[in-house]
Amino acid sequence: MKLNGRILFLTDDAELLARQLSPEKADEELELSAAALHYGVNTDLMISGAACTLGYTGPILGPWFLENFKEIIQKDSVRDGGFQVIVGGDAYGSGSSREVAVVAHQGAGIELVVARSFQRIFQENMVYGGMPFTTDFDVLARLRGGEDVDVRGFFAALPDFFRAVAEAGGLLDYAKGLLAGTLAPTYDTAPAPRPLNAVEKIIAQKTWTSPGTTGVGDVRPGDQVLCRAGFRGVHEYTAGMVVALYREAFGDTPMADPDLIAAFEDHFVLIDEPTVPANVKKARLAPAKQLTAEMVEACELYGIRLHGPGRPFHPGVCHRIVVEDYALPGTIVVLTDSHTPTAGVLNAFAFGVGSTAMAFAFRTGLIPVTVPKVVRVLVTGAATGGLSPKDLILHIIGDPYFREEHWRSSPTDTCVVQFGGPGLDQWNVDELSVLTNMTVEGGLMTGVVEPCAPIVEFLKARRGIDVTEQLVYPDEGATYERTITIDLGDVPLTVATPGDSRNRLPLDEVAGTPIHNVVIASCTGGSLSDLRAAADVLRGRTIAAGVRVTVTPSSHAVAEAAEAEGLLDLFRELGAVVSPAGCGSCIGNGPGIPLPGETTASTTNRNFDRRMGAPGPVYLVSPAVAAAAAVSGKLKDPRGL
């Protein structure tokens, strides 16, 4: 690659960003420093939820790349600006598993991505999609000096599996070689055993060694292995791309273990609700229906079970349904969605993947895993004063250790939190799932809950099964990157301030911030326990004048139970909008989208700029704090009502 285009630095300085977009301004004049680069350029900024509904190819998505970044970049700014290289700061590619974020780069003419560090899913998607990337900033000077740089050579510095995939021509071509027997595992299939933590033990048990055989005695951080996948899933945003990739590579060949595959109609089902702004419906509804139709057609063609309103299987947010119906201790769960870690609450290893990786998993029944570093978080003490798991996870991921990725020692490192300790037993699976769900917001691969009573009790009550023998315990003498003990008495009620879930502050420091829009919803904040917590604050009170409240149960089962308990009637009587189950306002596809001038308090898990479909600050809070904001019209400690 020779530099015949321009270099775009994604700076935190909006004026400097605007200057770069000026055709006559040469990027050589920019002064580059780590502090000047935007932290956590996320996939919502790369390609918005609205643009994702339009399709999944480069020509469709390229014009929308980075639209509204810093409220400066507009449609076609990058493509028409002749930019060839993009430069970001730390945690580049935070957020969603959407592989279309890589496709949008390519469609906009970007040939190389340079950043301080990359987030795990986005990095995998670049490898599988053939997008060259590096953390070596010296390449910029080489390109400016006129050197013809072999950017594909950056793949040579990657671990063995990533390099083998690149050499094979991509992950799906690698799959063909694997199935044909011309490719062998890139890892040791007979290592000597050693004590393993719970995460390593699940991976080791599921590591593929030869056709029909799994299980090794040891895996270590940084190893890259192929694992036997358990449950696999897609939703409307991703199914079309996954199946298009699958059909191009494998035709009509049946998928592996189809009984362990499902598709979910959940991300688009609320777009047409009455309180969704007309401009959102106009922009998103028609293309969303097209993507849904592609998913339905794929389900019929390949015999995939389909969840959704009026579909053969009950509706709800995919992550909640996976916990209710599919995930089991000791299994590996993958979906084309970054919040797949929710299922880690059941002592499973659950993580999000891109579309290419899922097409690979559909055909082979395997999924590539980079063995993570494991940080063990032991929770002790009692949750008093309304403290919830939402407060705890915001407190954890906002800690500098996680926010600044102190665990990282190489660009391809990954990290998992293994939750344990007696403090977990006071919460149920609904509540504990918030911990695992939001690990990804801390730049982590997933979270896994060690065996505890709530897991056993939930699966007995929900599915009538006893999983005592399936639970995966850490070995004595297992190794951890770090062990952190947290006494809940030291954790304050916590919020995430606008822009990133890692922007933690004690509630006391932002108390009094005016709130106009309250959202109690999503795979993080729409469980039965969440609705109960909000109702406990709202009961006997009224919603403040000028405050809108939206409540969305996370699944059909949650909605039925909440209706039976009178919770939904309580919300309705107070004037809240209660929608059917689904994934909506979190990604700007349903009731609760901020209106002009509004500040939002939301129980969702992600508060990136414009993530909820419109500009306006979004604070992430617990259900109780959300309800207190609804009553008082400001961020407030529920105990002060």
Image (spheres, helix red, strand yellow):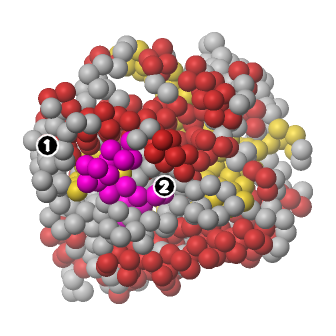
In this rendering, would 366 be left or right of 88? right
The local secondary structure at tag 1 comes to: helix
Instruction: Decide if residue 419 is in sight here.
Output: yes
Q: Residue at x 78, y 67 (%)?
A: 302
Q: Residue at x 49, y 66 (%)?
A: 269
Amino acid type at image mark 2? Ala
In this rendering, would 136 be left or right of 67? right
Figure check: 561 above or below 68? above
Q: Quarter of the image holding residue 129? A: bottom right
How busy is the neighbourhood of tag 2: few (under 14 within 10 Å), some, or many (20 plus)?
Answer: many
The boundaries of the magenta stretch are 567-589
Q: Which mark is residue 632?
A: 1
Q: Which residue is mark 2?
A: 581
Instruction: Decide if residue 148 is in sight here.
Output: no
**In front here: 541 or 76?**
541
Q: Quarter of the image holding residue 435? A: top left
Q: Quarter of the image holding residue 31? A: bottom left
CB under 8 Å between discs 1 and 2? no
Amino acid type at image mark 1? Ser
**Could you say where residue 442 lies in the image, as x and y percent from the top left?**
40, 42
**Could you say where residue 395 lies in the image, as x and y percent from the top left?**
32, 32
